[in-house]
Amino acid sequence: MHITSKGQVTIPRAIREKAGLLPGGEVDFILRGDNVVICGAAKPNRRGAAVVEHLRAHGGTRIRMSTDKIMALTRR
């Protein structure tokens, strides 16, 4: 396989498909001795996304008020 002057290589389609590497996806390079292992990058650990997901999971389960009741509270 040829490496371009920019350090780019083309991963063959069969390998991409088998590894689940999609266009626009991210990969990680891991050195193991003299070998380089390419694997799909883990999703970033984004705290904000986790907080939003937590709030979505609990939305509406703690307070059960009608819109009219909520509006009345905010207008006082």
Image (cartoon, rainbow, N blue to C red):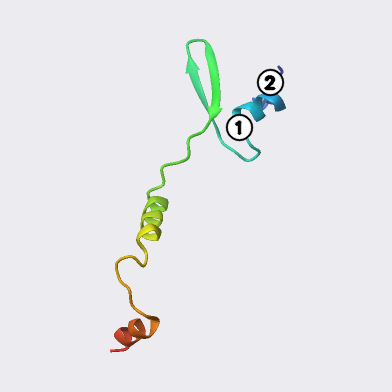
Return the residue at label 2. Answer: 3
Q: Is residue 74 visible?
A: yes
The image quadrant where one finds the N terminus is: top right
Of labels 1 and 2, the one closer to you: 1
Closer to the camera in the image, 23 or 60: 60
Determine whether, in the image, residue 39 is placed left or right of residue 15.
left
Return the residue at label 1. Answer: 20
- Residue 23 position (above or below residue 49): above
Label 1's element? loop
- Residue at 30 percent of width and 71 percent of height: 63
The image quadrant where one finds the C terminus is: bottom left
Say which quarter of the image contains residue 9.
top right
- Residue at 34 percent of width and 81 percent of height: 70
- Residue at 54 percent of width and 27 percent of height: 39
Q: Residue 55: horizontal and vertical position, in percent?
A: 36, 59
Q: CA distance from mark 1 to mark 2?
A: 22 Å
Q: Residue 30: horizontal and vertical position, in percent?
A: 49, 22
Q: Residue 17: horizontal and vertical position, in percent?
A: 66, 30
Closer to the camera in the image, 47 or 4: 47
